[in-house]
Image (spheres, grey):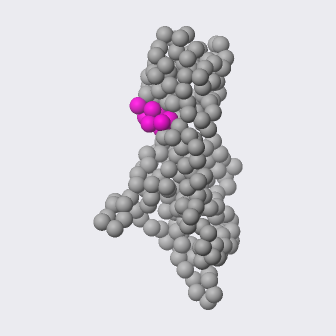
Amino acid sequence: MYVRNLRKSSPVKKVYKFASFKNRSIIMCESSLERDCCYHLEYSKDVVAFQSQPEGFYYSSGNKRYPYTPDFLVQNQDGSEYFIEVKPLNKIFPEDFKNTFALKRIAAKKLGKPLVLVTDEQIRKGSFLENLKLSHRYSRLMDTDTSLICVVDELRAIGPMCIRSLANNLKLSVGEVIAIVFCLIGLDKVNVSLDTVINEMSVISVN
């Protein structure tokens, strides 16, 4: 077993950083795709913690053993753990990759931690990722704003409603309420569909 250490960028390797509230730490990533994967892990209700470049392991091919470090180690609410390998979709079709990845999965299974392949098509599909990024940004800027309480109280009193109605009721601009909603999504205080662009007609409900 061994641990790779990503500390800073170099002329040959750029390091991407993700500020994780869930882990209370900065997650270091080797690619922008890995960093984008962090948004999904950060806001998944099933995930309690995640680590990039975790302790590696060896897999066997023929008579040789090769070192391998997964991109992430993820811990679920139920205590189970699994590894993630992040890859662009166009990189997973060659037979060499398929064969090697199958051997890595066998080795990971022996450790009691399944190895899961996640592609850019899954990570960057539709509007979901962009909504997570905006939630992450606003939750850092507005987490103590008193207007957050007003929005939550209004939703609890009246029930689900669209952003325009919330803005009218609270005498705020639509833009202000959208920013508040993104913050509340990041804080896990409200529900809204993240599969489409969030706008004035998006319906919001309180958790």
Q: Nearer the viewer, residue 198 or 49?
A: 198
Query: Overall secondary structure of the magenta stretch?
Result: helix
x, y percent for residue 149: 52, 19
x, y percent for residue 133: 48, 40
Q: Nearer the viewer, residue 123 or 49?
A: 123
Q: Residue at x 55, y 10 (%)?
A: 169
x, y percent for residue 87: 55, 62
Q: Nearer the viewer, residue 21 or 202?
A: 202
Task: Relative to 167, say whether 73 is above or below.
Answer: below
Q: Quadrant of residue 12 in the image? A: bottom left
Task: Relative to 118, say whether 111 is above or below.
Answer: below
Q: Residue at x 45, y 21 (%)?
A: 176
Whether residue 114 is visible to the viewer of this picture, yes or no, is yes
Residue that extends furthest to the left in the rendered view of this protein: 11
* Residue 137 covered by magenta stretch: yes
Whether residue 107 is visible to the viewer of this picture, yes or no, is no
* Residue 197 covered by magenta stretch: no
Q: Residue at x 53, y 52 (%)?
A: 37
x, y percent for residue 150: 52, 16
Q: Residue at x 45, y 58 (%)?
A: 31
Q: Which residues are magenta?
A: 134-141
